């Protein structure tokens, strides 16, 4: 389902940590837009917590340049995978 979506939005006011929703969508190559109420994965696009205008602006930015947003995810995944292999 994540791969069929253009973006995934996690518009919560609180979280116990970086949510599984955000991590799953990023792992599937789908850009995630999430509130900045907690520290998030560097690939997530953050909006100011409890700020609807910020949420709308970040969603628009991601959707306006979706190919670049998806490319950023690929670049980060490749870098992280390479780092994991080097550690082995």
Image (cartoon, helix red, strand yellow):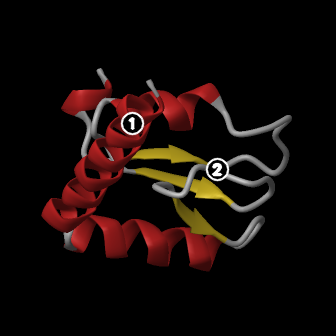
The secondary structure type at the circle numbered 1 is: helix
The secondary structure type at the circle numbered 2 is: loop
Mark closer to the chain start, 2 or 1: 2
Q: Quadrant of residue 54?
A: bottom right
Say which quadrant the C terminus sits in: top left
> Which of the numbered marks, if any, corresponds to residue 86?
1
Residue 57: x %, y % from top left = 46, 78
Q: Which residue is depicted at the point 70% across and 72% down?
A: 48
Q: Residues within 10 Å of mark 2 (few under 14, many from 20)?
A: some
**Camera-nearest residue between 86 and 78:** 86
Left or right relative to 6: residue 47: right
Q: Residues within 10 Å of mark 1 (few under 14, many from 20)?
A: few
Left or right relative to 16: residue 61: left
The residue at the far left in this view is 67
Label 2 and label 1: CA atoms lie apart by 36 Å
Say which quadrant the N terminus sits in: top left
Q: Which residue position holds label 2? A: 11
Residue 21: x %, y % from top left = 55, 30
As drawn, 13 above or below 8: below
């Amino acid at each position: 389902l994540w791969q069929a979506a253009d973006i995934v939005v996690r518009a919560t006011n609180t979280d116990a940590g970086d949510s599984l929703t955000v991590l799953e969508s990023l792992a599937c190559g789908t850009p995630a837009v999430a509130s900045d109420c907690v520290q998030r994965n560097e690939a997530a696009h953050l909006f100011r917590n409890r700020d609807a205008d910020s949420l709308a602006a970040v969603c628009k930015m991601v959707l306006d340049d979706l190919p670049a947003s998806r490319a950023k995810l690929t670049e980060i995944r490749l870098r992280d995978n390479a780092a994991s292999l080097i550690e082995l």
